[in-house]
Amino acid sequence: MSVRIGIQGLAASYSDAALLQTAGHATKMFCDSFSDAFAALAVGQIDKAFLPFENSTAGFITENYKLLHDSGFFITEEYLHRVEHCLLGPSGSSLSDVRVVLSHPQALAQCSRFLKDHGLRTEPYFDTAGAARDIARSVGKAAVASMRAAQLYGLEVLMQNINDEAVNWTRFLTIEKKLNWSKRAIFSCQTGDFLELMKDLPKYRLVSLLSQPMQTESWGHRYFVELEADNASVWKELVARHRGLKVLGSFEGKR
């Protein structure tokens, strides 16, 4: 039986395209939201979740870091996918017909300059491909989605490559229930533990750092720290030395 992998979005979403590139043999489960994918993994409907965590233009997808922290699951793999956005309209439409543009908030953020320059109002939607599917018969509406979505849902390509940055990458991470140590590792911690961890920073390469407010503590913050080392064996020692660290995953880095 093939591995079951959950993604957020529909067929022809960017998650779908990325998964086809890295695990095209998998049995896919389409989830409406990121939290639905984590829930499916928790109850055993899927073996892995494959979700976006960062974009080179719009930054971190902070919701997924919080979901990961709360889940008790682990990052095991990384995949970098190049994203090229198109403006899609109903068949036979033109750019001058468009008044409102629907898409996932991340896609809208990655094309914000184009949308603002053309005076287009935006409406957040659960998925790029879902937006493409649902504007097919809507007068005055368009979607930010992929060329593949245009082909699948029979849409007009009104403009290609509308992302703000010509080189636009999304970082997808595979989430599983098991942990395997590798040269890259991600941890979460609170402020005091973060300050102690920073004393050890010269021993590692700092890959990324994210802070989020804690809902349980006014003005408190949780930090997500991604580090890389020459040898995977160092992480067990690090966790033993800093008891406040929570391990969120370990994998081979691609960047």
Image (cartoon, rainbow, N blue to C red):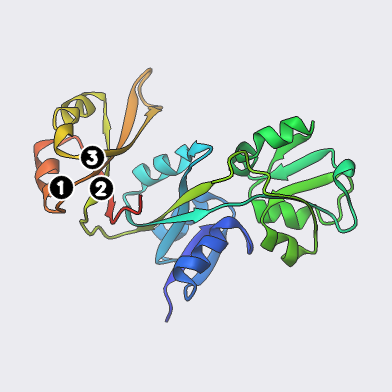
Q: Give x and y (percent) for residue 15.
A: 54, 57
Q: Pick the residue in front: 1 or 145.
A: 145
Q: Give x and y (percent) for residue 83.
A: 57, 52
Labels 3, 1: front one: 3
Q: Residue furthest bottom?
A: 1
Contact? badges 1 and 2 (CB < 8 Å):
yes
- Say whether disc 1 or disc 2 marks the residue closer to the N-terminus: 2
Q: Amino acid at mark 2?
A: Ala
Q: Give x and y (percent) for residue 30.
A: 57, 62
Q: Quadrant of the N terminus?
A: bottom left
Which residue corresponds to mark 3? 205
3D distance between C-alphas at marks 3 and 1: 13 Å
Q: Amino acid at mark 3?
A: Arg
Label 2 Cα neighbours within 10 Å, binned few <14 / some 14-19 / many ≥20:
many
Label 3 Cα neighbours within 10 Å, binned few <14 / some 14-19 / many ≥20:
few
User: Does residue 169 appear left or right of residue 77 in this picture?
Assistant: right
User: Does residue 106 appear left or right of residue 215 in this picture?
Assistant: right
Q: Amino acid at mark 1?
A: Trp
Label 1 Cα neighbours within 10 Å, binned few <14 / some 14-19 / many ≥20:
many
3D distance between C-alphas at marks 2 and 3: 11 Å
Which residue corresponds to mark 1? 235
Contact? badges 3 and 1 (CB < 8 Å):
no
Q: Give x and y (percent) for residue 119.
A: 79, 31
* Residue at point 27%, 28% (across, down): 190
* Residue at point 26%, 24% (across, down): 191
Which residue corresponds to mark 2? 185
